[in-house]
Amino acid sequence: MAVPRGAPTRRLLVGGAAAGPLFVAVFTAAGALRPDYDPLRHPVSSLALTGDGWVQAANFLLAGGLLVLLAAGMRRVPVGGRTGAAPWAVGAAGVGLAGAGVFPGDPLSGYPPGSPDEIVYTPVGVAHDAFSMLVFIGLPVACVVFGVRALRARWWAAAAYSLLSAVAGVVFFVLAGTGFEQDPGLVDLAGLYQRASIVCLLGWTTVAALLLLREERRRVPGEACPPAPQGVRPPR
């Protein structure tokens, strides 16, 4: 049986839609199982520093790969006549997540137990932070570009959601970063703010993937029936 023309694109979008829910579910479960880990205070990346840290490292790698698949799918489904730079920004974020899994972050805010509150930078930790910035810059850029394309396509709700996701993701990221710098008023909730930023931005990738999946299905509803061979009358 012939594969519908849109099937590969749909697989890419479905895989990309799973990135956010999977990533959030894994780090939430992993954090709940660590007795000395406080999700309100500690960053997600600190889950990769303990004996079971391979779980969070794999989580980074898998989610990053799924975002790269999403970027490939986004390039195949134009919004408002063009795809714009959103797929490239999402792809950069995917590379950033994967890189953050390869290079673990430095201990922070007293985790793992016995570590100082203030971060002591190492080359590996700096590489982790650099890759992480691809996520927290790339996804807001993707939100804005997609939102502008959605405006041109008159997808009003999608445009508003995309732009609000960009703003909320950046605001929560700044609050988290200030808290991780041991600001007395924010340090105890820095992990919560980081999670809010991640949920806003990765949640947007899931919604965008589902919107594009709907558009792809509308654009390619299915394969047409093949024409009857010459000299053979179709059945009445």
Image (cartoon, rainbow, N blue to C red):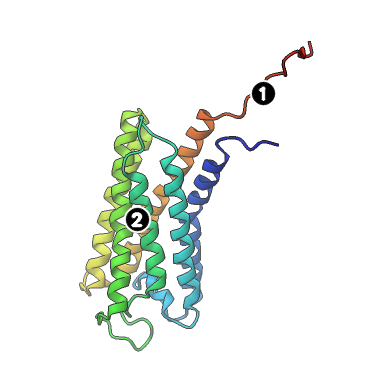
Residue at 32% of width from left, 86% of height from top?
115
What element does badge 1 sit on?
A: loop
Q: Which mark is residue 92?
A: 2
206 vs 42, nearest the viewer: 206
Q: Residues within 10 Å of mark 1 (few under 14, many from 20)?
A: few
157 vs 133, nearest the viewer: 133
From the viewer's perspective, is residue 223 above or below residue 20? above
Furthest residue in direction front, as rendered: 231
183 vs 10, nearest the viewer: 10
Residue at 41% of width from left, 64% of height from top?
98
Q: Which mark is residue 225?
A: 1
Residue at 32% of width from left, 64% of height from top?
132
Label 1 amino acid? Cys
Q: Residues within 10 Å of mark 2 (few under 14, many from 20)?
A: many
From the viewer's perspective, is residue 6 above or below residue 107? above
- Which of discs 1 and 2 lies nearer the camera? The answer is 1
Is 177 positioned to the left or the right of 146 in the image?
Answer: left
Label 2 amino acid? Ala
Is 150 positioned to the left or the right of 64 in the image?
Answer: left
Q: How many marks are shown on the rendered structure?
A: 2
Q: Which mark is residue 204?
A: none
The quadrant holding residue 153 is top left
Is 179 positioned to the left or the right of 30 in the image?
Answer: left
Q: Position of residue 200 (x, y in %)?
A: 36, 52
Mark 1 or mark 2, earlier in chain: 2
Residue at 48% of width from left, 41% of height from top?
210
Q: Position of residue 26 (x, y in %)?
A: 50, 65
Labelled pair 1, 2 in contact (Cβ < 8 Å): no
Q: Quadrant of the N terminus?
A: top right
